[in-house]
Image: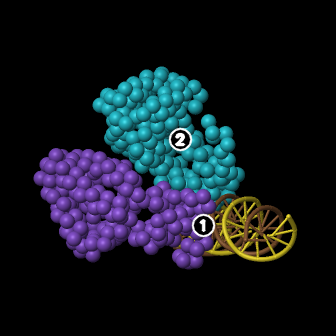
Chain colours: A purple, B cyan, C yellow, D brown
Amino acid sequence: MDSDLKIEAPARLRDVVLERLRAAIVSGRFASGERLVERNLCDLLGVSRSVVREVIRILEAEGLVEEGTRGPMVARLDWAQARQIYDIRLMLEAHAARECAGRADDTVRADLRAALGQIGGDGALEATARFYEVIFKAAGHDIAWEIVSRLNGRISRLRALTLAASDRKVSGLSRMTRIAEAVVAGDGPGAEAAVRAHLTEAAQIARKILEA
Amino acid sequence: MDSDLKIEAPARLRDVVLERLRAAIVSGRFASGERLVERNLCDLLGVSRSVVREVIRILEAEGLVEEGTRGPMVARLDWAQARQIYDIRLMLEAHAARECAGRADDTVRADLRAALGQIGGDGALEATARFYEVIFKAAGHDIAWEIVSRLNGRISRLRALTLAASDRKVSGLSRMTRIAEAVVAGDGPGAEAAVRAHLTEAAQIARKILEA
DNA sequence: TCGCTGAGTTTGGTATACCATAAGACGGAA
DNA sequence: TTCCGTCTTATGGTATACCAAACTCAGCGA
């Protein structure tokens, strides 16, 4: 890895706050519909309002925060929205997986296996994201990846609501392994089908949670 | 229209600036890759940095602005990106048109005709947006509409590059009329095909422009 | 002539101050 | 008791101030 030499850019306060706040919302630390009072967030995070406000704009664009009558609040998430998000992800990911399978070279295959291997470990969430990133980037679908990343913020909120997270993780891993196998084998239609199966299952679980 | 009674929310400076700056970028007032120096924008727009900075965050999320090494700059737009955007729009719009055709009621049909009727007039751009909004909303694809709206900012930049805008407008109108006709007739596959034809043509034009 | 250095300037990052408005509390009059 | 008006306060919108890093460029020495 040549990343050892990379100079890490000094972390901007904005990025840190963005990450924190996003995590807080995704993890359910703030309830759906709860108002995000700027000055409270400033106290909570120990930063000034400038930072908080800029971060709120970004989270608004991600759909995690929406404007209430009096100010920003945590976006509400219902099944109607989640269903749409899964539909969109399905289209974009299926397309990317198919194209990726058609053009994956050895580097891509190796990256895919590496990401898959880390999913069982600690940073499961990051590894999963990395897995998809490899697929999208290899397919030349940068913009689609950008979109899916943003949508993932909202989807991730669903995961936090799941109680039995462990068994789903296993299931998800096996599904993703099937995706990877199809991609590595250059089997476009198979990869697409695997993506479809994975997302359909995930959507079913989300539906059960949100309709309850 | 009962909208006569509606109290218009006091326009926030942020919204005005957002619109202005977006228009400036889309129209080519700022060159691709040009640095957006905050203090310059403040002078230009006559507002404070707080506002400018928040607006820049929003435009960043729209992909119209990207972070340079030293600060924000107007995003570069090449054919590789535009092609991806057209691909994504194709998927989302085709899907929406198909579903809209399957469930359009009289209200939707009327709205669609109204929007179509206004496209020839002054606010062609707004009317076009309204046309698609009707289709997406009627199909129950709010989130997809949100995504397409954002992507449209980038696509709109292409239009500004076109010299012969008039003949394309006519062509676009006839294509959109075909979409509307298929939707009104409840012809899902036909609507999808019309969308496909329209976007394919638009993509071809964009390609010619960007590869030159 | 080339290169180094240091002052000055630009620029983005961050914090704070001020203002207008709307919600909420409180009290008086019918 | 209820309704209305007023006062207080919370809150978001906007502007300004300050700082540190980095870029520029003149000046100086080898």
Asked if badge 1 and badge 2 are on a common chain, one would say no
**Chain letter belonging to callout 2:** B
Where B26 falls versus A72 (above or below)?
above
Front one among A107 and B200: B200
Where C17 falls versus B57 (above or below)?
below
Q: Residue at x 47, y 39 (%)?
A: B133
From the image, tell me which residue sits under label 2. Answer: B26
**Chain letter belonging to callout 1:** A
Front one among A211 and D26: A211
Residue B119: numbered disc: none
Residue A50: numbered disc: 1
Front one among B152 and B33: B152
Where A114 falls versus A183 (above or below)?
below
Q: Is residue B62 visible?
A: yes
Residue C30 left/right relative to D20: right
Where B165 falls versus A190 (above or below)?
above
Report helix, strand or loop for mark 1.
helix
Amino acid under label 1?
A: Ser
Report helix, strand or loop for mark 2.
helix
Q: Quadrant of the C terminus of chain B?
A: top left
Q: Position of residue A112 (x, y in %)?
A: 21, 60
Q: Position of residue B86 (x, y in %)?
A: 37, 39
Q: Residue at x 12, y 53 (%)?
A: A185
Q: Quadrant of the N terminus of chain B?
A: top right
Q: Residue at x 43, y 47 (%)?
A: B142
Amino acid under label 2?
A: Val
Q: Is residue A9 visible?
A: no
Q: Position of residue A193 (x, y in %)?
A: 18, 50
Residue C8 left/right relative to A93: right
Residue A16 left/right relative to B46: left
Q: Position of residue B90 (x, y in %)?
A: 35, 38
